[in-house]
Amino acid sequence: MARILFDNVTKYYGAVKAVDCLDLDIHDREFLVLLGPSGCGKTTTLNMIAGLEDLSEGDIYFDDQVVNFMPPHKRDVAMVFQSYALYPHKNVYDNIGFGLKMRKYDAAETDRLVRDAAERLEISHLLQRRPSQLSGGQRQRVALGRAMVRQPSVFLMDEPLSNLDAALRISMRAEIKELHKSMQTTFVYVTHDQAEALTLADRIVVMKDGIVQQIGTPDEIYEHPKNLFVASFLGNPPINLLEGSIVVKENKTLFRKGDFTINFSAEVSEKIAQYAGHEVILGIRPEDVDEKNAAVFGQGIAGLVDTVLPMGSEQYLSMHIEGSEVFFRVGKELRHRDGDEVNLAVNINRLHVFDKRSTLNLIWA
Amino acid sequence: MRSSPKRDIKFRLARRFDYESRSAALFILPVMSVLAIVAVFPILYSFYTSFFNLKLTRPHRVPFVWFDNYIKVLSDELFWASVSRTVSFTVMSVAAILVLSLSIAILLNESFRGRRLLSAIILIPWAIPTVANGLLWKWIYDSGFGALNGLLFQLGIIDSYITWLGDSDKTIPLISNSFVWKEVPLAAILILVTMKSIPEDLYRAAKVDGANVFKRFIHITIPSLKPGFMLVMIYETMMAIRHFDLFFLLTEGGPAEASHVVSWQIYVETFRNLSFGTGSAMSYILALVTFALAYFIIRTLGSKL
Amino acid sequence: MKPTTFDARSEIYRNKSQTTARLRNLSIFVFSILLLAYVLGPIAWLLSSSFQTEAEIVSVPPHWIPDEPTLKNFEAIFFSEFEEVTYDTRKKADPVSGGYIPSTAKDLLPSMWNSFLVSIAVVMLNLFVGVPAAYAMAKIRFWGRDGTIYTILTTRVIPDIALVVPFFLVIKNLGLLDHIASLIVTYLAVTVPFTVFILVSFFESLPDELDKAARVDGCSRLQTLNKVFLPLSLPSLVAVMLFAFLTSWNEFLLALMFTQTIASQTLPIIVAGFTSDFTISFSFINAAGVIAVIPPVVLAVMFERYIVSGLTAGAVKG
């Protein structure tokens, strides 16, 4: 059981800052996801927890102990790698049992733990095989088994699902979540897949260029993104962005881009009235519109549908607002066709307004 | 909490001497100590020696002579004659090695029955000791009973037996021939290995584009072989420049001075004249020249490390 | 389009491709034969002359295949130590040529043993010294890594002949002259850069994540090397062992400098001693040559696969 604390940690590769002044408190038994595009420093952070990379400045604590330069084999961590990194010359049984052997568990205990883990992961029938004789999904399970069998106090995963095909990925997500529940230990999980992060995490750390953008629960991150990067990194299809300005007119605060205007709710107006005249970017998530209640809200977006993208359970409409392309999600009660005229109501309680220069969210920051 | 200078030093020390650095040091230590004693020290020591008039025939008077040894060597006509012999030996050997090894590599890159056996057999010259190589060719070249005379005579190419190694016009080319025979296998394998690493798709694409065998060879094989070719060329040049064994075994620098090359002269100067100072100076000149070539080796090989 | 036309055309193509295939096979055959002759011709001549009597070997033109093959040259090598060599027995030389079997014939087997000891020791030390260094350079990011690599490569760039004098002085000061240890130490320095180079290339080709996985699983650096990397690098290890063995077995120049008596002289030195003596029987020298050639050739042909794969790791990237 461990709490991990990063105190102002910086990591240089030569002159490049891979991680910049990282302060991070990972709670005991938490499922924390490090999310960001490649090169954002998330894997470096994970490696620093494992002891696979040293740090250039700052301190890392496990509970109350400073572990800055403690080598990996002295830390009670286990790790699952993207390429699985199974030992090619050992069979599945020995792959899973290797960590126990290195930690001097006796043979009977090792045998019991390995077989238990194999049972749980449903790979008991594969124990005598070599990694080269396994499918990708089976290798993934062996890698999980190798890590969980030791019951480490910190469980690290570096993009463990990105080499699997889509269907398998979804089902493995559920298993990993299950695993976290039953193991009752700290999980740190690195991914660039926002859907994975939203599904698995207790808390998400969004990183970019070595700098933490936001830390919060999946809901906080999705609903109240602190800046434009976080808002656009999460969500599929991504949030619609419109450049314009804030105008205060007749006691009402509104967003204007050319002829297109939208009124803010009273609550939001209060927060952003001070930015009147500022250049801003308005963010509307594709799902924050409604067709049926257009009349009720009165905050409509009317226009012609360029293309309809049916998705089975719903449909996406591609439209243009003052020259910018936007996507909206609507139900499939009404079947649209290309060129139809539609009238959509915007949920004004869920709008995002970002300062154009600082990219900070003016409502939630 | 972290900015006190005392802590900084402690942190930096911990970082410099962390587990990784300590294990690396431990792993590197054996090889570095061996090389320090048996390579780095001798190299530096020989540099040092090259500034003294050190003669083992007169061991108690060893004056420091600045660059005199170098000047003496560089103004010695025999030295320059040796240099030109080394150059011609190197040029003809390397050219022959390149041509032969490329042809062999092309052959072995084809698939046919017995290819594996053939590629094992061609390693034989590379594996045999230079001494055996020397005595083998000395016997072949023997003017009285050697195979070369016998063969050429039986084929009717020559009317009477000829002097081979004893003829100063033929000495260097003949020694070069025995050198090439031994060096070709390794060169061929290096080129073959590069050839095999050319992606098959390139050839398929060219075939689809309508290139015939010869066009494919010129436009794909040759350019892709450049790294392997460079490696072989540089490596073999270095081997040829420094080559000593065959000159000792076949001719001992003779007849007269016909095979008196730089490496042979270094040997004579140090171990027959016992003049270590000029010998070292000569060694250093040779080393520096090879170094210029090594620069390319490190650029081509070292950059990949 | 009539089907017949189509058939006729495919017939032409088939004939054409058959002709090219035949041509290809023929040229492969011819070139293979030429290559075999070039490589094996000199060896065959060596072998043939080693089985000839002194009378036969001096025939003009030469007998390519001995009329009366004899084993007396090999007998001399393997049994001469039991014979008293005196001025008189030396006179039992071949009456036709006057060539005789030298008294040093009995040194051949002991020198072979010296060669063997030196080579085995060099191979062992190469592994002991080279493997950890190569692993560290391939997988540990440490301060001075590049400098180390360049130093190691540089030592191999300087010609042996240029190092002979300082080597000689070092060996003399260590009191190792005429001792096989002098050869072991210097051969180690000569072979280890290549060992390190090949193994670094190989270790680098193994994924970093494998290294990380082992360390997170609880291996120290040494355990990672022993339990994960070494079992995977057998082919490369065989290749470097072979290279170190052959280099040591074949080395001539340094052995010429450092050895003086049979206490330390290696096979190449004893054989070279024969060739410089004009009175020694040609067939005997050739037999000695055959003896010197057999072990390295057997090894090279046996492990040809590993030589190629070992070089592949290092050369292709260059």
Image (cartoon, coloured by chain):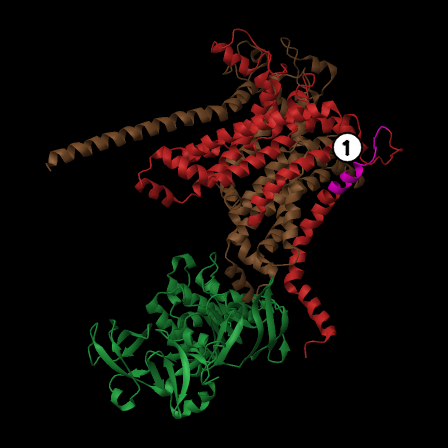
Left or right position of C89 against B118: right
Q: Colour of chain C?
A: brown
Quadrant of the image occupied by residue C174? top right
Is residue A232 found inside the magenta-colored segment of the image? no
Relative to B46, does residue A362 appear above or below in the rendering? Answer: below
Q: Residue B162: x and y, percent?
A: 57, 10
Front-most of A190 and A259? Answer: A259
Under circle 1, the secondary element is: helix
Residue lying at the far left of the rendered structure: C2
- Residue of label 1: B70
Q: Residue A59: x and y, percent?
A: 63, 74
Front-most of A138 and A328? Answer: A328
Q: Amino acid at mark 1?
A: Tyr
Which span is picked out in magenta?
B42-57
Left or right position of B292 against A50: right
Relative to C62, does residue B198 appear above or below in the rendering? Answer: below
Q: Residue B82: x and y, percent?
A: 68, 24
Q: Colour of chain B?
A: red
Q: Residue B40: x and y, percent?
A: 72, 44
Quadrant of the image occupied by residue B129? top right
Is residue B53 found inside the magenta-colored segment of the image? yes
